[in-house]
Image (cartoon, rainbow, N blue to C red):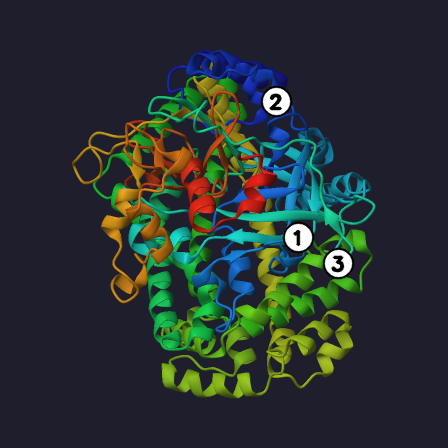
Amino acid sequence: MNRHSLSLLAAAVLAAATAHAEEGMWMPKQLPQIAKALKAGGLALDPRTLNDLTAFPMGAVVSLGGCTASFVSPQGLVVTNHHCAYGSIQYNSRPDRDLLKQGFYAATLADELPAAPGSRILVTVDMKDVSADILDARTLALDGKARSDAIEATEKKLVAACEADAGHRCNVYAFFGGLQYQLIKQLEIRDVRLVHAPATGVGLFGGDADNWVWPRHTGDYSFYRAYVGPDGKPAEFSKDNKPYLPRHHLKLASPKTSPLNEGDFVMVAGYPGRTNRHRLPAEVDFAFGWEQPARIQAMGESIALIKAETAGRRDGEIRMASRMQGLQNYFKNLEGQQQSYAGSDILARKQAGFDRLTAWIHADARRQARYGADLAATQRLLAERQATVRAEHLMGFMSPALLNAARQLYEAAEQRAKPDAERKSGFQERDLPRLKAAQQSLDRRYDEPSDKRLAAHFLAQYLAQPAGTLNEAWLGALGLKAGQDEAAVRAQLDKLYAGSRLADTATRMAWLGKDVAAFKASDDAFIRAAVALYGDDQKREDRDKELGGQLQKAYAGVQQAMIDYHASRGEAVYPDANGTLRISFGKVQGRTPGADGGTWTAFTTLRGIVAKHKGPDEAGGEFNAPAEQLAAIQARQFGDYYVKALDSVPVNFLSTLDTTGGNSGSPVLNKKAELVGLLFDGTLDAVISDWDFNPRMVRSISVDARYMLWQMRTVDRATRLLDEMGIR
C-alpha cells in the first residue's frame, strides 16, 4: 500500500469508528486510531496500551494455532475452550480411562499430562510490516509462478533471520489479498500439558444439538500449562522442565466488586481465523452457489459414515472424536451460512458495491490506467481457479489417511536432499518437529474401519464422474478404473491397506529419516502409491503457483482500488481476519427478536441446565449433566457466584463482539481488562457475518467466568488451580 493510501485509510478509520462501533476485528496498530470509540464505549485503560504486544493485557493473550488462550497465573497456567483442548483430551483418553466422558483434573504439577503431539502455545512479541521487502521492484516485475516463487523465497529469508532468535516461530501473513505483508514473531512454547478439563456433560453440554444455538448452557473451558527447559527457554517435553513464567497474566474479575451486567463494555483479544467481507461478487456467488453446498454434502456424508462405523466401538469413537467434532462444527456453521444467504440480498448488495467501485475506476483516466487491467484480470483468473476447485473437490475427501501420511513422508525425503533454504515451506528444518507431530498424532487418531469406509465412499463417487475428467495418476497409483462401484473400490482398498505397515507408529516414524532411494525401493503399498503420485502432485502444485502468482498481482490491485475508493468516501476498511492478533469491542446485550422470534436475554443460568438435562440415554447423551452438578444446583450451593437479579449463577452470555472461528478460547475482558468470560461460539443465524456483517443480528456467545469458577469450586473441587489464580 502506498503512503497516500495509508494516510487516507487512517483518516477513514478514525472518521468511521463510531458509525458501527462494534464492527471490526482491529489490528493492534489500528487501536490508537479508534481510541475515542473505545473510550466512549467504556474502556477504562489507555487505549495506547493495547497497541503494545508485550505489555498488559496483550502480552497475556496467546495463540494455540487455531484457537486462542490466555495466561491466568504467574506459573504459566493457560485457560481456553474445552473444544480447543478437545484434541488433547481425546489423545489422552482410552476406553479404560475415558477423559472425554469423565473429565480430568491434575491434583499436582506431576499429574499434568502431555498435550497432543504438535500442541503449541504461541506468544506474539512483534509485528513488522514487510510489504516493501516482499513486493520489491524485482518481484513486482514478475508474474505467474516466478512471482509466487520470489514471494516465497523472500518470506523464507525474512523468517530465517527472525528465527535466529532461538525459541521463536516467525511467519509472514498476507493482508488485503496480498497487498500488504506482516512478519509476525512469536515465542513458541513446545511443552504443553493438560491440567484440567470438565466432564463432557459440562464442557460439551448440549453437544451438536445446541451448537451455534441460543439459549446455551455449556461450560466450554479447559486449562493447559506452558513448560520450558530448566534454563527458561522453550524446549521439548522433559520431566526436568519447569512452568513458564509469563511477563503478564490476566486477573479474573471479582464477582463481588466487578460483576458483569447487561450493557457493560467488553472487548476480546484473539486470533480470528478467516473472514471474507472483502470478497468480490464472483467469489460470493461461487461460494454459496456451489462450493459450500458441495462441502456440506460431503461433510454430512462423512459424519454419517463415521457414526455408522464407530457405533458400539468406544475405542473407535474416541479415535475419531476430534475429527468428528471438527466436521460437525464446520458442517453446522456452513449450513447456517447457507440458510442466511438463501433469499437474502447479500449478492445483490455485493454486486451493487462492486459496480460502484467499477464506475469510480472508469470515471477517471488515471484510475482506469492504474486499476482497470487488474479488475479485468481478476475476474478471468477467479473463473479459472473455480473450475479447478470444481474438478478436484472430491480429491480432498477420498485419500486414505495412510496415503496422506506417505505423501508427506516422501515429500519430506525429496526436500531433505536440497539445501535448507531451497526446500519448500513446511519442509525445512524448522518444520521437522511439526512433521513428526503430524505423523505421531495418527497413533490415537487413526481408525482403519472408518478410514477405509470414507475412502471407498468418496473414491466411488469420484470414479462415477466422466472418465475424461479423472486424474489418471490417481487411478494408476491406486489401481482403480473409471466407473468402478464402491464394492470394487473396497476390494482394491483392502489390498492396499493389507499391503502397508504404516499403521504401525514406529514404522511410520522411521520413514522420516529415510532417503528418496529407500522410498522408491519400498514394497509398502501406500509408499509406492505416494511415489507414483509425486510427479502429478508437483505438476498440480506448479499449476496452482502459476495461477496464484497471476492472481496475487491482479487481486492486490483490486484491493488497493477498494481501499482508495472507500477512503475517498471517509469509510473504514479493516483487513479481513487471517489468523493474526485482532481486537474487537462491544457490550453485553441480548437480542430482540431472537432467531426463534422471542426475546433473547443476555444471560442463561443454572436453571437451564436442569431444564435441558435428559440423562445418558436420550438425545444421544448430549444433555447429560453430571449428577454432582445437578445435586449442587438443587441444593442452591451458589456461593459467591450467585447473582440476585438472576436468582442463580450465570452460565453463558451474549455480546455484540465481532468474532469468528479462531476466536474460540479468546478472553473476554471488561473495561479494566479483567477476564469475565471465554468466547466460544456465535449464533447460527449470524455466522453469515464472516461474509456480511449485520450489527442487528451479530451476537457472540461466551462462557461466564462465574460459572467456570463455580463449577471448579463446588463440583470439581479444583482448589489448587483456584488458589493459583488468586481466587479466594
Front residue of this view, candidates 606 and 488:
606
The amino acid on which the numbered mark 1 sits, given as a three-letter code, is Leu
How dense is the environment of label 3, judged by Cα within 10 Å: few (below 14), some, or many (20 and up)? few
Query: Disc 3 marks which residue?
Result: 239
Q: Earlier in the sequence, mark 1 or mark 3?
A: 1
Whole-angstrom CA distance, mark 1 to mark 3, is 11 Å
| Residue at figure coordinates x 18%, y 40% from the top left | 596
Asked which secondary structure carries label 1, the reply is helix
Sequence-first tag of 2 and 3: 2
Marks 2, 1: nearer the viewer:
1
Q: Of tags 2 and 3, which is closer to the observer?
A: 3
Please name the residue shown 44% across and 37% down the image.
705
Residue 721 horizontal side relative to residue 326, left or right: right
Q: Residue 527 at x, y = what percent? A: 64, 78
Residue closest to the eye, 399 or 265: 265
Q: Is residue 212 visible?
A: no
User: Which residue type carries mark 2?
Assistant: Asn
Q: Which of 503 and 10 is in front in this view?
A: 503
Q: Position of residue 411 (x, y in %)?
A: 68, 65
Front residue of this view, candidates 227 and 701:
227
The span from disc 2 to disc 1 (Cα, nearest Å) is: 34 Å
Q: Residue at x 59, y 68 (%)?
A: 536
- Name the image quarter holding residue 623: bottom left
Callout 3: helix, strand or loop? Answer: loop
| Residue located beneath label 1 in the image | 109
On the picture, is 353 further left or further right than 664?
Answer: left
Disc 2: which residue: 51
Whether the residues at callouts 2 and 3 have beta carbons within 8 Å, the answer is no
